Image (spheres, grey):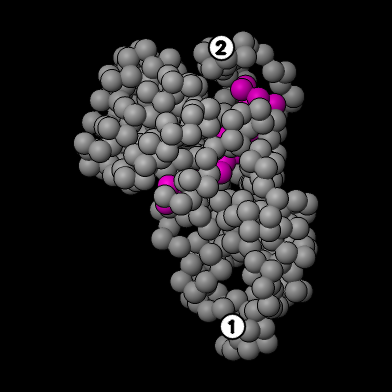
Amino acid sequence: MTRATLVNVRPWGAEPVDIVMSGAAIEAVVPAGRASGGGERIEGGGLLALPGFINAHAHVDKSWWGQPWVPYGGEATTQGRIAHERATRDGLGIPNAASTTAVLREFLRHGTTAVRSHVDVDLGVGLRGIETVREAVDSLGGAIEVEIVAFPQDGVVRRPGVLDLLDRAASAGATSIGGIDPASIDRDPVAQLDGLFAVAERRGVGLDIHLHDGGELGAFQFELIIDRTRRSGLHGRVTISHGFALGELPAERRQDLLDGCAETGIAWTTVAPPRTAPLPWRGMRERGVPLGLGTDGIRDLWSPFGDGDLLRVALGFARLHGLRTDEDLAHAVELASTRAAGFVHRAVHDLVAGARADIVLVDAENTQDALVRAPRRQLVISGGQVVVRDGELRV
């Protein structure tokens, strides 16, 4: 088993340490200069060390990254973007392994070492997107870990045959299946949820539902998901993505929904988009409701934005929610790393013995400085292997 020691780094801005790695895991963390044993020595130069970032909500199959610029089109609604994507993607060769690989390389370059990606599964593309993502991951030789959520972007019950595709994806290794706006997309929330929960329970996978609907329509669907989770065997295995309505509701209504999420173990992911209502993140933290950050789509037919830098997403979360104190700013970085462990099925993700050796070094005074400046990633280690040095990829 390969051994290596990362010497003289400051985890989370604390006193300098040496991090001893054995294989893909951290074996020990000791005061700087006290590491013993053989193997490669990697100089850390006193830089700030953070755990590798975890992207809890991505769509790596949708991107046209690496292709000529594609102008944004379609109507600026969820339905409009779906229709535009369906009409345009084949002509651009989406999905394809080259663009997916390019996106994953950008994730790595910015310090993301684990990803939970929704991958489109529909009547047009079938399961080809999942195969494409797996091909891209394999081409990087294990430098980045990707969990797949089979995602029915175009609806579920309104497209006969999609539930069967989701079932096939789950049996073929997807760790979760997805849903989308049961009310406004399928216009039959009970039927969508019944179908999704049946597949998830039968196949033993998780469930992740995109919810864009606002206000009381969104709240109604939260209640349905909480109730269905309560009556199912999926406690702790259901995630709501986006869920913008939660930040729009009166405080008392929000509290009841948060209590329901805490009781049933429902998690939440957000990309912290501007001009949306802030989430009640403090209430989530107090109740132990998991919250993860993600990039969403990057340079795709939904939006031309995105660069793969999850630290900038954490900064966007901090700005959207008005974070100012050192404690709160550090929490934003934790949401992009340690607190997202469960989204990629890790018991622990930190700079501690026993964790996977995913480490990011930046030239920053402390965690807060790293957040607000998002400096270049000087060194990225994934699974004990150096994959980025001086901001340049080595894979």
Q: Which secondary structure lies at badge 2?
A: helix
Is residue 325 shown left or right of residue 144?
A: right
Residue 127 pos. (x, y %): 40, 29
Q: Which residue is mark 1?
A: 30
Specify the amino acid type for callout 2. Gly
Q: Which secondary structure lies at badge 1?
A: strand
The residue drawn where x is 54% and y is 37% is 279
Is the residue 346 above or below the residue 212 in the image? below
Residue 271's image quarter?
A: top right
Mark 1 or mark 2: name the one nearer the start of the chain: 1
Residues under numbered marks 1 and 2 in contact, where contact means CB atoms less than 8 Å apart: no
Residue 6 pos. (x, y %): 65, 75
Is residue 219 shown left or right of residue 106?
A: left
The residue drawn where x is 68% and y is 77% is 15
**In the depicted view, which residue is nearer to us: 73 or 50?**
50
Q: Residues within 10 Å of mark 2 (few under 14, many from 20)?
A: some
Residue 45 pos. (x, y %): 76, 74
In this picture, which residue range is highlighted in magenta? 288-304
Dominant secondary structure (helix, strand or loop) of the stretch shown in magenta:
loop
Q: Residues within 10 Å of mark 1 (few under 14, many from 20)?
A: some
Residue 273 in sight from this viewpoint:
yes
Residue 328 colored in magenta in the image: no
Q: Which residue is mark 2?
A: 80
Distance from the alpha carbon under mark 1 to that under mark 2: 55 Å
Residue 296 pos. (x, y %): 58, 34
**In the depicted view, which residue is nearer to us: 205 or 122?**
205
The residue drawn where x is 70% and y is 50% is 324
Specify the amino acid type for callout 1. Val
